[in-house]
Amino acid sequence: MADAIDGLVVVDKAAGWTSHDVVAKCRGIFGQKKIGHSGTLDPDATGVLLVGLGRVTRLLRFLTALPKSYTGEVVFGTATTTLDSSGDVTARFDMSPTADEVQAAAGGLTGAIEQVPPMVSAVKVGGKRLHELARAGEEVDRAARPVHVSRFDTEPTDDPLVYRIEVDCSSGTYIRTLAADLGARLGGGAHLRNLRRTAIGSFTVAEAAWLDALTVLSPAEGLRDYPAITLTDEQVTAVGHGKRIELPDRTLRLLDEAGELVAMAERGRAVVVLRPA
């Protein structure tokens, strides 16, 4: 297979598929060896998954860093091993929170907070991923990590123990942990179900598609959440040969005069150069 395509596809992942499954399927669809995604979605979760093709795989860390948005449901009164509906029940609680109490507790989980990664996450401890240890029946201490939750809205449903949620947050935020922490703040326990990622940066479910209807975005469009500057032909040549040019001290797309992505820049220098191929 030849690496003939450099671009990004915005997938609306279906439930029952792992992120790895989606990448493997896209590898066959596009005939690509170099392919990867910018942030895992659990098999039960649905929604936006960004898949990079060809040289865009070198740019995935810029996409992983973008903020995320989610919807889902928090089920109060039941805690599980995985903090979501796929796990085994570990405890039951007699709870009857009011809508005001739930929203107030959610408000306490906004802003700059710290989260302990769940055992079913891909975080590595001692060289092993937590989900691998969890499958082996092990549980280890995990250090809390700083995240930022800019919105955590709750809405009651017909079931008094189930609340719909909408969350806007930084990369690295675990929504299942938010659900469990919300239950704990209300004096009991809770777990997450029906998680859907509705956006990664400016890429929303409205733009996403399933595997039979994908559109490939150019590298420049795939990195559109970052501001851009246009280089002269001389600057394009210099960057392509690894020479330093004067650049602002921030993360930028460097475009040529045709609007194609030449490189990404950080801290005043080009760090991922696509041109020449």
Image: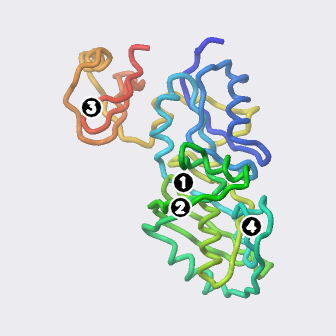
The amino acid type found where label 1 is placed reads: Lys
Dot 3 lies on which element? strand
Q: Secondary structure at mark 1?
A: strand
Is disc 1 surrounded by few (<14), some (14 to 19) or many (20+) residues within 10 Å?
Answer: many
Q: Is residue 273 left or right of residue 212?
A: left
Q: Could you give the CA–CA distance between mark 3 and mark 1, rounded to whole angstroms? A: 27 Å
Kind of element beneath mark 4: strand
Q: To which residue does mark 2 refer?
A: 168
The answer to which of marks 4 and 2 sits earlier in the sequence is: 4
In the image, residue 87 above or below residue 65:
below
Q: Looking at the image, is mark 2 or mark 3 earlier in the sequence?
A: 2
Q: Are marks 1 and 2 in contact (CB under 8 Å)?
A: yes
**Rendered residue at 29%/42% (across/down):** 250
The residue labelled by disc 1 is 68
Q: Residue at x 28, y 25 (%)?
A: 231
Residue type at mark 3: give it: Arg
Q: Earlier in the sequence, mark 4 or mark 3?
A: 4
